[in-house]
Image: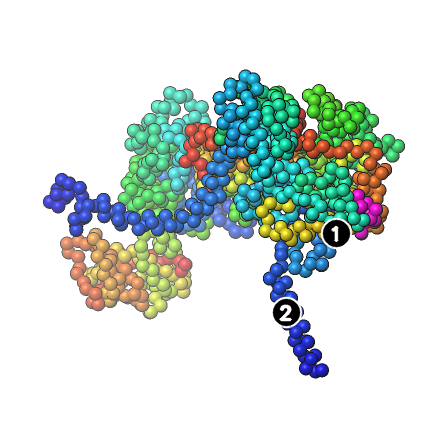
Amino acid sequence: MAQAQAHSGPMVTADGVPLKTSLRRAERRRKITAFMLVVPLLAFILLTFIAPIGDMLWRSVDNPAIINTLPNTVTALEDWDGEELPPEEAFAAMVEDLRVGQENRSIGQVGIRLNYEMSGARSLFSRTARNADSLEPPYKEALLDAHRRWGDVETWRLIKREGRPYTASYYLSAVDMRYADDGSVAMQPENQRIYVALFMRTLALSLAITVLTLLLGFPIAYLLATLPLRYSNLLMIMVLLPFWTSLLVRTTAWIVLLQQQGVINDLLVAVGLIGDDGRLTMMHNWIGTIVAMTHILLPFMVLPLYSVMKTIPPSYQRAARSLGANPFVAFVRVYLPQTVSGIGAGAILVFIISIGYYITPALVGGQSGQLISNLIADHMQRTLNWGLAAALGSILLGGVLILYWLYNRIVGIDNMKLG
Amino acid sequence: MKKLALTTTALAAGALLGVANAGDAQATDLTVVSWGGAYTESQVRAYHEPYMELNPDINIINDDSSANALAGLRAQSQAGNVTWDLVDMLPSDAQLACDEGLIMPIDHDEVLAEAPDGTPASEDFLPGSLGECFIPQIVYSTVMTFNNEMFPDDNQPNTIEDFFNVDDFPGRRAIQNRPAANLEWALYADGVAIDDIYDELETEEGVERAFAKLDTIKEHLVFWSEGAQAPQLLADKEVAFATGYNGRMFNAAEVEGQPFSIIWDGQIVEWDGWVVPEGGNNVDVVMEYLHWATDTQRLADQAKFISYGPARASSADLVGEHADLGIDMGPHMPTHPDNYQSPILLNNDFWTDYGDELRERFNNWMLQ
Amino acid sequence: MSESNDAFVRFINVQKSYDGETLVVKNLNLDIAKGEFVTMLGPSGSGKTTCLMMLAGFETATSGEIMLNGRGINKVAPHKRGIGMVFQNYALFPHMTVAENLAFPLQVRKVSKAETEQKVQRALDMVQLGHLGNRRPAQLSGGQQQRVAVARALVFDPDLVLMDEPLGALDKNLREQMQYEIKHIHESLGVTVVYVTHDQSEALTMSNRIAVFDDGVIQQLAPPPDLYERPLNAFVAAFIGENNQLHGKVVEIKGDDCKVQLDDGSIIHALKVNVDKVGDRTTLSLRPERVAIAPPEGQYPNVFEARVEELIYLGDHIRTRVSLCGTDEFIVKIPNAHAHASIARGETVQVGWAMEDCRALDAS
């Protein structure tokens, strides 16, 4: 009766309001409350995570120096074909820009920016700008007299090319490429290629560290999950101990252990396994990076594994054995597959952290143990080439996202268990 | 009489209170950024502490961020919140910061003190040391150092050439992971005259030549990145030679008693000094401090605590003994005549122009 | 039926201690014949599961010998014992389908693919799950998982199957249904089953014989009717079914008949089971359904006045709590027959029982 009526049109409540509207109203309050609870964290993440990443992506293409400081030159060069030296108007525009730039101290940034592409650009601009006021027309001759580089077509092509608000040159540099003289994209000269090799090395070392933490962490996690509580607590404390020690202290401890006059070498010499002149080189190279980082990142592998293993009842292995499987088969076919989610979580965690690590490699890695992050930090702090640092960081971010996507395709992210 | 005394006391008390209040109200914190360690210590004892004694309303706060000064200056400038008042940095970085407008140009003769004999500051500071925005304090040098115990007594190295001679002087060598100094040394050891080094480096052949020379010892090299690593590597006998700053090496050898010897041959000489960030809150106070802290006596005082030479000619004669060790500092100064036989003056203009490219090549070379 | 030396499973003087100080299993001797369904019944901590685990090979006997089919198996690894096992939580491998779970024991035995498929299908059909082979265990209901677990323990044709409280997680209806199914499977396959439970009705329903465990010792080993009708001690009497317990002192023994004086002075005639001599303390055990309300004069030697304290209607019978002989916890079950006595709360009625139904057991 009432139901039959309701079925004929949209459902309404007893007082005639459509049921959907009524439900929405009832839910709104709850939603607002839930939203208010999330707001602080959301704002925090926006401010400290999303915004910096956005800023990084922006900086990797942002190219304001030339278009802002040399506006007249850029305009004057618009119709220039790039074959021979530009006409007098372009030189005159340049002198005007140099004068203004010298006045408000912005010309230095042009030199810094162009020096990334062409060595010597900095002194070209700073010296010419200092004397810009004394230059007399015709400006073409005056500039050619001031510095021979003004007579270089390449200089003008560079200004025209980089006189755009956005640039791809940071990304090109980040993959060991550059604009050739004719504006096409080419590989860097062999002796200036760095980044691709470093990206590859970073991947390889991170992978090695991931595999090592897995091999070392799996038995520990298994023990943790199966030992009686009083032993497993002690073991857990030992696993977590690295977490409670400062990173520098741990790294320094590894230096003491690994160096040529260090504890391990001394021990091997004392036992007679190696001669005093045959001391092993275990740090200041990639071995040091792998050893120290494996130790530091071990808890990130052990904890997810442990949390997954903890949920696997011992009866599964017993069942397998009662069904006729020897301990090895029971482990491989029954236990191991159930830990896949923990392995996946731990591996992805360790891999992503190690891909971005730089303090430890800087201290124990020598040259062959440096990772891409060390160069990013170098560009952030020492050379101040933030555009290149941003491009390198963006590529790293992209790489991690691709890996994440692959993982999701192969294992399924829903299968990941962190705890 | 009694009444008068009372009034005087009251006045004095009032004046004292007033002064105290005024002092409270005006107490200024100056944030001074420097390199930390023994170097900051020498500045604290030579400059900061005496200055705060003279000016109780000034409070100097140390910040050991000079290693990343350029990045910090740029970040503060972009954020519009400049918290540093005075920064100790290298002239090459200072030139960059100056070009970017991050630090203030300084009129040398207006801001800086004259020498005691009336010589204007611009003439008293060592030639070429003053920059548009940069006031030098010290001359330091990057030197080759070795551990005495790694070589027999009758065969101790003493030239840069010996550093490149792995047959007669075996052992690993630690150098900094950047091209500056290393390329100069490579050419110097390969027989290029000191005055020609930078001309040679401006050519492709010269760069090739430098890297080829470095290649001859590459398998014996260890690279350091932080200044403190070099003396540590040497003390641990991880390496036989290490390049490093002469002050740190002095500290390790004389204060800590490490068996280190410095090879003054081919020392790479550079300045280090102050810059004033653009947009700071206490510019006037800082300028007053700068005037005082860079005068002849103060620069000489710093040499009592660390083996870096004063940047003023008039300070040289005032350099005395180490404040704690009581040893004569003269022979430990990079500028001492015995040490200053074959110095290579670091050419900042060259590195400003070619640094970006050569850093890439050097990184590439290290990776191979 | 199991006294001979060719018993299929034998526990000989088996002891088990975990900490070297206390014995969890104390000198266990138990023979199980081929094809028998034996249940180990007892409260938790009584040692029954430990015995099962020793038989399966997951625990080692501290001393004594366990024999399977005439062979000592103390040193035989679990996977070489050829014993099927059903676990409390089923232990179905969650990452394998039902069919893969069933194929597992055959694969590790290198059974050919065709034969594996055939056996898996047959086992699934046996538990009426032939159509669910491709499901994951998590997609099945509790009862279905239970059936798969049973099928998996049987698929490789073991001679002995162990079941460790397999029905504990099921609700009551399903549990009863599964009891019958397991019983039927046992009967049709003729496989030997050792079953552990703390649920007496489960034990009574399925077993050929029940071993009642308490404190690491088998209190009584007997077929279900014997266990219920003729408990040998107070623990078994209390553990199996409901009973009224009265405490007193033996005052006279005449053959099977012993006269017991309760603490309030009443004299009861009881069957002498577990008392030695006059003067011993004893516990009298009496099933509530063996007590008659208002019995005909002279039918029973034991007749007392009882005051009705409480009546609870339970459908098939009426549970009546009365006070008599100094206790007010005395339970009488009145069957809900057409002619059942209708009594009311507060009334005083006559109750009586036979001497044989009242067993004089240890004082406990």
Residue stretch rendered in magenta on the structure: B313-324
Asked whether, in this view, residue A208 is left or right of residue C255, the answer is right
Q: Is residue B319 magenta?
A: yes
- Determine the secondary structure under disc 2: helix
Name the residue beneath numbered marker 2. B17
**In the image as oriented, which residue stretches furthest toward the front?**
A137
Residue at figure coordinates x 63%, y 69% from the top left: B17
Q: For the point 69% across and 30% down, which residue is it?
A: B350
Q: Amino acid at mark 2?
A: Leu
| Chosen colour scheme | rainbow
| Residue A335 visible (yes or no) | no
Question: Could you tell me residue A51's position as x and y percent?
Answer: 47, 40
In which quarter of the view is residue A261 placed?
top right
Toward the viewer: C139 or A11?
Answer: A11
Residue most extreme to the bottom: B2
Sequence-wise first label, 1 or 2? 2
User: Mark 1, chain letter?
Assistant: B
> Can residue B342 be seen here?
yes
Along the line of sight, the residue nearer the viewer: B291 or B305: B291
Discs 1 and 2 share one subunit: yes
Q: Could you give the CA–CA distance between mark 1 and mark 2, rounded to whole angstroms?
A: 31 Å
Relative vertical location of residue A34 with respect to residue A322 in this rendering, above or below:
below
Q: Position of residue C235 (x, y in %)?
A: 39, 54
Of A1 and B192, nearer the camera is B192
Percent x, y of residue B333: 81, 42
Q: Label 1, on which residue?
A: B46
The part of the image, by quadrant, that contains residue A287 is top right
The residue at 73%/25% (across/down) is B199
- Residue farthest along the left direction in this orientation: A1
Is residue B284 within the magenta segment? Answer: no
Check disc 1 and report its element: helix, strand or loop. helix
